[in-house]
Image (cartoon, grey):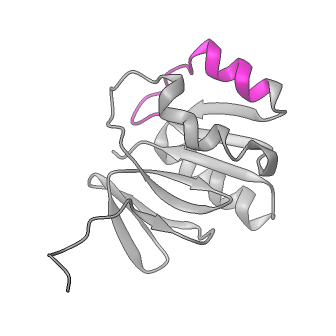
Amino acid sequence: MSSGIEIRAAHFPGRPPIDAYGNGGFRFADMSHRGSIFCLPSGVHGWDVVEGQALTMDLFKQVLAETRDIEFLLVGTGLSIRPLPAELKAALRAANVSSDPMSTGAAVRTYNVMLAESRAVAAALIAV
């Protein structure tokens, strides 16, 4: 017998385009997610990051675990562009992954285009 509601990490096991963003979240695959997300080869995952938070290597562990299937990583850094940590860029470069920080809106649009072109793209998107 269950002892109550089980809370699990947010995960959608597909590669849908992002239909909308804003109001603190994203819409995709006829669903909505409040908060930031990773769009990876393994699916869409919740990402515990808020706008303005310092970007660290530790926050990108899940991306780094899937680099064999990623050629491009788009990082939506919120309303404004922020640089990625040098350590992260070096780790991605060593795995042959190009990375590009941009506003979240630009990252969503670019991700959708690259996904439609069947490119090996991933995105880390901070909710705005």
Residue at 84%, 33% (x, y): give it.
96
| Residue 91 within the segment the image draws in magenta | yes
> Magenta span covers which residues?
77-93
Residue farthest toward the front in the current orientation of the protein = 1
Name the quadrant of the C terminus.
top left
**Residue 65 occupies quadrant:** top right
Residue 47 lies, with reference to residue 17, above or below; the image says above
Residue at 47%, 43% (x, y): give it.
104
| Residue 40 within the segment the image draws in magenta | no
| In the image: residue 71, left or right of residue 15 | right
**Residue 2 occupies quadrant:** bottom left
Q: Position of residue 86 (x, y in %)?
A: 63, 13
Residue farthest toward the left in the current orientation of the protein = 4
Residue 107 lies, with reference to residue 101, above or below; the image says below
The total of numbered circles placed on residues is 0
Residue farthest toward the bottom in the current orientation of the protein = 1
Pick the residue in front: 80 or 124: 124
Residue at 73%, 29% (x, y): give it.
92
Q: Position of residue 5 (x, y in %)?
A: 19, 74
Residue 103 lies, with reference to residue 44, above or below; the image says above
Residue farthest toward the right in the current orientation of the protein = 96
Q: Position of residue 34 (x, y in %)?
A: 30, 58
Q: Position of residue 76 (x, y in %)?
A: 51, 39
Name the quadrant of the N terminus.
bottom left
| In the image: residue 35, left or right of residue 80 | left
